[in-house]
Image (spheres, rainbow, N blue to C red):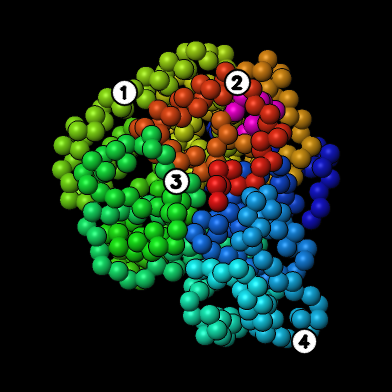
Amino acid sequence: MLKRLHDTAAGQDTALALSQVDSLAPFTYGLEYSAPARGGWTIVHIGMLLPESHQVFVCAQSCLRGVVLSAAELGDSSRFSTISVDEDSVLEGNCEEIIIEGVTHILEGLPALPKALLLFTSCIHHFLGTDMKIVFGELNTRFPQVGFVQCWMNPIMRKTKMPPDPFMRKQLYSLLKPADMCRRQVNIIGNNLALRKSSELYTILEKKGFSIKDICTCHDFREYETMASSRLNLVTNPLGRPAAKELCGRLGQEWVYLPVSYDWEQIREHWKCLSDLLELDFDSIWKEGEMDQLWQKAETALETLAGELAGWSVAIDYTASSRPFGMAKLLVKCGFRVERIYADTISPEEEDTFAWLKKQCPRMLLCPTVYHKMAVLPRTWCREAGGKVLAIGQKAAYFTGTSHFVNMVEDGGLYGYGGILELAAMMEEAAGEEKDTEKLIQVKGWGCCC
């Protein structure tokens, strides 16, 4: 399956004009390239969101290297331990005993017992059929005051229906227990980054007397437990839906999927939906929140910036936003020259948006990120464009070679009209100031403040 990286006759083109794209998965892969843009979160970073918790990874030493470095880079090694799986333990078939005794040894050596322990098993345990029911049963007996959370570190399941990332997000809420419902409390579920205060979501709901809970802002385990009382779980990231579904079945919490959007009318529809679910008068919310003015302010900010950046090209990548094509459509309609989108697949949720871009911008390029030849392609577009390339996302900055980029992952906590207005400010700042791209994009888990 190995490819000759410099063999230009072999393989496919590394970029396709949108007019050439005829499927949601236009690129085929064998050997894959991993760009040195490390801002996306790993399961280590996601697990750190659970307050007063400790993580234990059980896997081979070669696999442990990456997660150990992630914890060390965060400065959170005190919340992180490992149990090494070697050849003898595999041959002797005593994986259950090793995990139980290893976790016991770790917990007894800590200054104080954590409120929660996230136990990560790896591929080898799936191959061997390790009985995790026995493991968790014994650990619960030995340490009843600790909440144990089952987690996976198994890249073999990266492209299954439940990859480690959404599974990890779901498991973060597994320690919530049934509680009396508070009619004036709402959760934001499944995000790695807290929604920014620039979003009108906070001002409007808080004005109506609602309390908004988010694991990203919980200071301690007790505050985390109060999330069980919320009447509604709001999901803004597609990877958070499994968590909301599980909480609905287990705690009876209603949930709604209102994803980040860069479409003015869709944001309005989302507010109508949320108002109905919370039994609020939509018209009064729209008027009291001055939504029309905020919408107009955001649109004017983008259109003004587009005029100021005439002659600049824009590139967007999928790590910056779960809606890269939606973001591109908005920027195009506001007057920006979006020339490239770096994404390996197109989400079915963006199929209509992609069709619009394909019709209106047929020469816009769709570029892969993991196709093996991306490792050797020259990253000189920015230099050839006289430095006038504005990237949104770390991978777009890396592949274009620009130092003018919006450094964000997973929409950066932006949401609603206020989020779009803040995006305009971030783009203006990125165009006016050069960043040290090489240094910044190597920081793992951008925005993870554990």
Which of the two discs, 3 and 4, labels the residue nearer the N terminus?
4
Measure how far apart labels 3 and 2 are at the Cα level.
26 Å
- Is the residue marked by circle 1 packed among few (<14), some (14-19), or many (20+) residues within 10 Å? some
Compare residues 310 and 45 and report the one nearer the observer. 45
For label 3, the residue is 194
In the picture, the quarter occupied by the N terminus is: bottom right
Residue in the image at 53% along x and 22% along y? 429
Q: Position of residue 328 (x, y in %)?
A: 49, 31
* 219 part of magenta stretch: no
Q: Position of residue 362 (x, y in %)?
A: 53, 28
Measure how far apart labels 3 and 4 are at the Cα level.
45 Å
User: Could you say which disc has been placed on residue 433 in the image?
Assistant: 2
Q: Position of residue 323 (x, y in %)?
A: 47, 40
Residue in the image at 29% along x and 50% along y? 211
Q: Position of residue 151 (x, y in %)?
A: 56, 68
Compare residues 81 and 159 and report the one nearer the observer. 81
* 401 part of magenta stretch: yes
Residue in the image at 30% along x and 69% along y? 179
Q: Tell me if label 3 and label 1 are in contact, CB under 8 Å.
A: no
User: Could you say which disc has been placed on residue 213 in the image?
Assistant: none
User: Could you say which disc has been placed on residue 296 in the image?
Assistant: 1
Task: Describe the element under mark 4 as helix, strand or loop.
Answer: helix
Left or right of 77 in this view: 184: left
Task: Describe the element under mark 1 as helix, strand or loop.
Answer: helix
